[in-house]
Image (cartoon, rainbow, N blue to C red):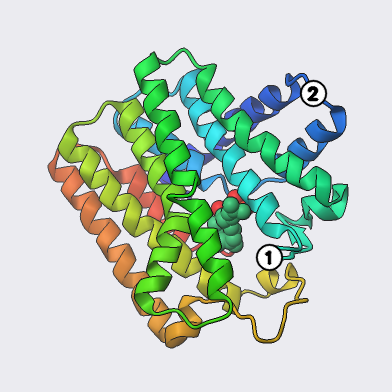
Amino acid sequence: MKSEFEHFQEQHLTHLNKYLEMYLSRLNGEQTLKDAMFYSVSAGGKRIRPMLILAICNETKRKIDEDVYAVAGSLELLHTYSLIHDDLPEMDNDDLRRGQLTNHKKFGQAIAVLAGDGLLTTAFECIGNTKLNDSIKAKLMTALAKAAGPQGMVSGQVADIEGEKKHLTLAELQLLHQRKTGALIAYACDAGSLLGGVSTEQQKEIHQFAMAFGLAFQIYDDILDVVSTEKQLGKAVHKDQFEHKNTYPELMGLDGAYHQLNEALFKAQCSLKSLGQLGMKTELLSGFLDYFARRKN
Ligand code: GRG
């Protein structure tokens, strides 16, 4: 039987994808660039980050209108940019992404870099073009830049690359993940709070939920890299033999990683309980947690 979250996801995914397709198709630019941008966005992906924004809006009774889809869609554009750049030979050097050739394998490295640049900048344009009030737009754009930029994801990526030549401690690995993956997930939840107009207490607890969920998501991704053959198939391993990925299973073994995962999921559930006590509906977010802790890719 499908959960409330799965019904919600089905209901909103089509609209979100239509929004993304419509926005990208209306851009007035070089066709090759537009094709490369659309190629990676339309390849699917779980749409976790936009779904978090939509789910929090729903829990806070914020009407899910075109502006909400725009804010959610803009985050997916930015996330897709990060995947395109992450796959480049000088970064993770992957051949497959979202079940198809990586952007640079299909369009060449120069266009892939530019498609990423195009998606990153278009994300901010999407927010700018909403009918939200200027103060909310400014808050969203500042928070998104902070989460994606040198204080967030970009620093996480640098720490990941530099960490390939050494063994990180648990604290260093947590900080790396908090920036590389956690920052955008936290932004998604903060954006949902802002759009939903929640109280300060609720906003703080939603942020705590995001931090725990982001960590759980990353640990589970590390675990899937070890246990899922599907993930292994996408890897193009041409790396130096002294380089290695710092992951939870590598640092503490698979059992240790599962233990950390359960701890993070427990923290996220505690935040949901607190949010319930603060008067917020949380069934959807709870379903979200279950769904993503059971995913296969
Ligand atoms: C290039 C600045 C820059 C940053 C890249 C996001 C990222 C930072 C790298 C991705 C590498 C990676 C596999 C990280 C593990 C967790 C993660 C972010 C997975 C990809 O996100 P999903 O699982 O992907 O949400 P889909 O395709 O479902 O959207």
Ligand 1: give its quadrant: bottom right
| Residue 102 in the figure: left or right of residue 130 | right
Q: Position of residue 285 (x, y in %)?
A: 35, 46
Q: Decide if residue 271 is on the left or right side of residue 182.
A: left
Q: Residue at x 66, y 57 (%)?
A: 86
Q: Earlier in the sequence, mark 2 or mark 1?
A: 2
Q: Is residue 6 visible?
A: no
Residue 13, percent from left and from top:
57, 36
Q: Which mark is residue 139?
A: none
Q: Residue at left 84%, top 27%?
A: 30
Q: Is residue 111 left or right of residue 86?
A: right
Residue nearer the viewer, 233 or 4: 233
The answer to whether mark 2 is within 8 Å of ligand 1 is: no
Question: In the picture, which quadrant includes the C terminus?
Answer: bottom right
State the residue at coordinates (73%, 19%). Answer: 26
**Is 137 located above or below residue 191 in the figure?**
above
- The residues tagged by marks 2 and 1 sit, at their Cα atoms, a distance apart of 29 Å
Callout 2 environment at 10 Å: few (<14), some (14 to 19), or many (20+)?
few
**Residue 293 x %, y %:** 44, 63
Q: Residue at x 50, y 76 (%)?
A: 247
Cβ at disc 1 under 8 Å from ligand 1:
yes
Residue 22 appears in view: yes
- Determine which residue is flagged by label 1: 92
Residue flagged by tag 1: what amino acid is it? Asp
- Name the element at disc 1: loop
Residue 55: horizontal and vertical position, in percent? 40, 38
- The secondary structure type at the circle numbered 2 is loop
The amino acid beneath tag 2 is: Gly
Residue 283, picture quadrant: top left
The image's mark for residue 29 is 2
